[in-house]
Amino acid sequence: MVVHLSGELQALTDHYKKEMNAMSQMLQDLKSRLPPPESVAPINKKTKRTKPLTSSNTKKTKSSNNDMVLSNKFSALDNGTDIDTPATTVNDQANEIEITKAINDMQVDDEFPSLNDSTKINDSKKRAYIPPIVVDKVNDGKKLMGELNALTNEKVTARVVGDKLKNFPPSAEAHRLIRSEITDNRKLQAHTFLLPQDKQLKIVIRGLPHDYPTEDLIEDLRNESFHVEYVTHLKHRGGKEVKCLFPRESLTRELKYLNDVWNFRICSQDDQNIGFRQQWFKTPLYKTGEVIPMPVPSSFNDITQNKTIRDYLGWSWYDKEFYVPQRWSKNFRIILRFESAHYFSMVYLNGEEIMNHTGGHLPFETDVTKFLNFSSLNRVTVALNNTLTDKTIPQGSKTFKGKNAGPYPAGFYTQGTNFDFFNYAGIHRSVFLYAMPVAYIEDIHITTDINNSTGYVTYNVSSSTNEFDSINPECIIHVVDKQEKVVGSETGCSGTVTLKNPKLWWPNTMHHNPGYLYKLDVQIKWNDIVDQYEQPFGIRTVKVTKDQFLINGKPFYFMGFGKHEDSNIRGKGLDMPLIIKDFNLIHWVGANSFRTSHYPYAEEIMNQADAQGIVVIDECPAVGLVSFGEELLKQHKATLRELIMRDKNHPSVLAWSVANEPSSAKGSADKYFSEITKLVKSLDPTRPVTAAINADYNTEKAGKYLDFVMLNHYYAWYSDVGSTDVIVPLLVNYMSKAHDVYQKPIMMSEYGADTIAGLHMDPPFIFTEDYQTELMMLHHQAFDILRSKRFFVGEHIWNFADFLTLQQITRVVGNKKGIFTRERQPKASAKLLRCRYHSLVNRTIEGSIAYCPHSQISTYEC
């Protein structure tokens, strides 16, 4: 929780000064986390810098008493005016970098601090940070410095600005002697920190529950004479910014999966904070009360027969005990990584908080080397909260029914969501330890281009060298084909490898050898330390014109589905048999693409899409946004940064989808989507940006910022229900007029009808298989008319398979619009769509073609 205090320091009480002095003492240990002076790069203080994809993270600040963290661009605690410095010394920069980065890195709003125990200040091996001393009204600075050097018998550096002298004591003893000499003997005005009147002081209070009422805290602080302006919850206290190289074993790297049966428990609704108050993370979870076994990865909702757990919102707790190999204790950096946990996670290792993360569906990790026991058992504990609000991505609500609403049971609440799928929660994907050299490859970024018969592979390798900062790493790069043959090489940590007649990455409907992948074999060396990583990639280009979507310069037509990560029992838990089954069904239908509706899918799915030549529209979790506030915008941007960082090297990802069905007709949506799309294009200028829109094209505000537009419409279902005869004229008219407005390619990203498998009626009636197939055939007729207009670039049916939703009278155990059942059995619509997609690319279907309508389908390159 961040407390924002007024800069009017004269009004602070003695009590407050005492507290601040205690915190300034805590800051003495910051020195241990500052880079050496010679390694600090100059900073333009007037310019807010945007981090590139390859930027490295900083270290974080954490208090020794595990209670409070002080972090900001501040100089605190004495009156006076700010020092006007036209230039900044190396030591000044180092001081500012550390304190500033503690709140500027890896945060939802680039303002709140991350807490990374890898920089814990109670490490006795680290030197203490010594704050500078500023002396006012110095007549002869050179003379004073000579006297201070003689006094301390140490080398004291300083810089003079006007009549002020800012000196940098080399030790705590030197600091004490200089401070005493200046203030006691010479009676000069001196101060360690200085806070200008127009600045704010921000204090981070740790140890409070995520939902601790801010109004109570404000009242308490103001009663103590603190000048509190406002309080905000920490939104993204995490570990090191995730560079998100997918964890792969190599000659220098090892993996240990923690996927297993973990202990699990939930908290009662009338005491959600009991786990924090009783510090469940300090002891094995089974000692805190009754626990149940819970498989990881999985959603916890459908594992038990307990209705309360199925519909639970709030804090749940996991823990798992494990050993690590003793050989990892030397010359290894060890990462603890979670691929996905929904929604807000706090992670503890052996009783110490090591990281937390906001948002589901994306990975987070931190260095845990110094927290591990190499000769005894370890324990990881996770506190997880799946409550959604109007400021989360996606949005939602939790409403308690009080006594005024009626005689509801104690703690009764309702869950509200702005999306039509079940709010599954849990540790959804793999958890593992990842051992790598202490100096290591941090990130690899690959882009490709094609010019006639020549392919260009441009790469950038970033590394983290820790104590080897002064050593320039040696990079050796090899491009390796599928036959493990080296087809190109380069040296240097950034550059371009040129390949003659390369094999291109193609979607499965455009080439007989789709999904061709190379590997970029990266080896990096510092003295005797070597790290090695193999990054798969494909050589391809993507471009959007006024009326076409081009892959490798050829028109591409999207044929596929919206999907969900959803299955019986596992919920959204990683399920490799189901993943492979789904890809087999995608090929059986003849599809070439899908959208990761409405959140990023598991990296294992993305890897399969790369290898099997299936195009992916990669969507962030911004589904059904109904408001567009600043806090939501910051969370949205943070999620997009993480998504693009993770998936930037996947050749199957040909577009970023920034939202699904937002309320984009609202006036506030204009600026909001302007900023969102600008961010995405700055992070990745090589891919187009899109979103799925269901608001009217005449009034909605997002489409003008997109490179191509996806439209969701349900003719003869959510409008004119049962009247399939309206589909063709209304759909053709709407899409044509939308293109007139947008002047860019358009695709149908959602259409369909709920269908109960096995239910039939003739003439067709809603919810029958007969109605679903009739509705689809008429949509296909409209699509063929639109394809002749050339601007129409694709059709995705909703949905690939049935999926669970919240309980509501319009859903019969979930959304039934799938062409497959939840168990992946085909409905009649699956066979109809199979005929459709094969016919579009002139492929013959083996076996029965009984479901193929005898309508003329024009040839189109897909």
Image: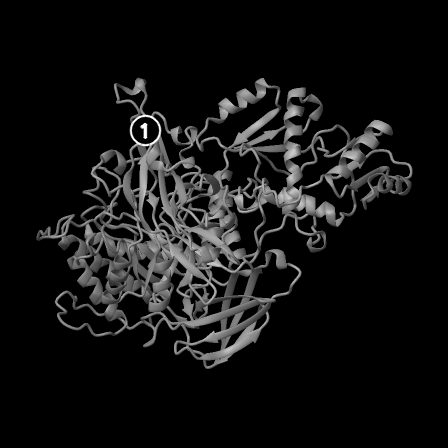
Q: Residue at x 37, y 45 (%)?
A: 321
Q: Residue 788, percent across and down?
A: 32, 67
What residue lies at 24% left-to-right and 74% top-to-bottom? Answer: 843
Where residue 178 appears, as percent x and y from the top left, is: 80, 35
Q: Can residue 739 be seen in this view?
A: no
The amino acid marked with disc number 1 is: Ser
Residue found at x 15% / y 49%: 756
Disc 1: CA contacts within 10 A as few (<14), some (14-19) or many (>=20): some
Q: Which of 250 and 230 is in front in this view?
A: 250
- Above or below, 14 against 837 in this view is above
Q: In this view, does 189 lie to the left or right of 686?
A: right
Q: Is residue 175 left or right of residue 332?
A: right
Q: Determine whether 834 is above or below 195 in the image.
A: below
Total tally of numbered discs in the picture: 1
Residue 158 placement, left or right of 393? right
Mark 1 secondary-structure assignment:
loop
Name, please, the residue furthest toward the front. 375
Observer-nearest of 689 and 73 = 73
Q: Quadrant of residue 179?
A: top right
Tell me, what colour scheme is on the image?
A: one colour
Q: Image height check: is 5 above or below 807?
A: above
Which residue is label 1 attached to?
268
Q: Residue 67, image x and y in percent?
A: 54, 32
* Residue 158 locus on image (x, y percent): 81, 44
Foreground residue among 397 and 206:
206
Q: In which quarter of the image is residue 150?
A: top right
Q: Is residue 852 visible?
A: yes
- Image position of 814 with respect to 561: above or below: above
Q: In which quarter of the image is the C terminus?
A: bottom left
